[in-house]
Image (spheres, helix red, strand yellow):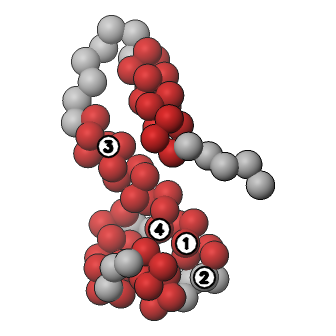
Amino acid sequence: MNKVNLKEYTRQTVRQYLQDLKGHQAKNLYDFVIDEIEMGIILEVLDFTEGNQTQAASILGITRTTLRNKIRKHKV
């Protein structure tokens, strides 16, 4: 299995995003990136646990209530 350096991958992705703006103003980039990453992690862990929210919350290190709130927030 190939190891992914998440920090470097994130830097490359943000760099590409900023270049793709082609002079347009970036706004709320931090919130945008955090929301995208959070949604990706939640979806992947829910797939891994076959939708078991209790197990997913445990893997994520959050309560099931927090997970459910994030699911609602992201309309997953």
Residue that sits furthest to the top in the current view: 23
Among numbered discs 3 and 2, the one appearing first in the sequence: 3
Dot 2 amino acid type: Thr
> Which secondary structure lies at badge 4?
helix
Image disc number at residue 45: 1
Marks 4 and 3: in contact by CB < 8 Å? no
Separation (CA) of disc 1 from disc 3: 20 Å
Image disc number at residue 42: 4
Among numbered discs 3 and 4, the one appearing first in the sequence: 3
Which quadrant of the rendered structure holds the N terminus? Answer: bottom right
Can you identify the residue that label 3 sits on? 32
Marks 2 and 3: in contact by CB < 8 Å? no
Dot 1 amino acid type: Val
Image side of residue 35 versus residue 3, left or right:
left
Residue 54: where, in percent of width, then height?
A: 45, 91
Q: Is residue 9 above or below residue 39?
A: above
Residue that appears at 30% across and 14% down: 24
> Which secondary structure lies at badge 1?
helix
Crowd class of label 1 (few under 14; some 14 to 19; many from 20; radius 10 Å): some
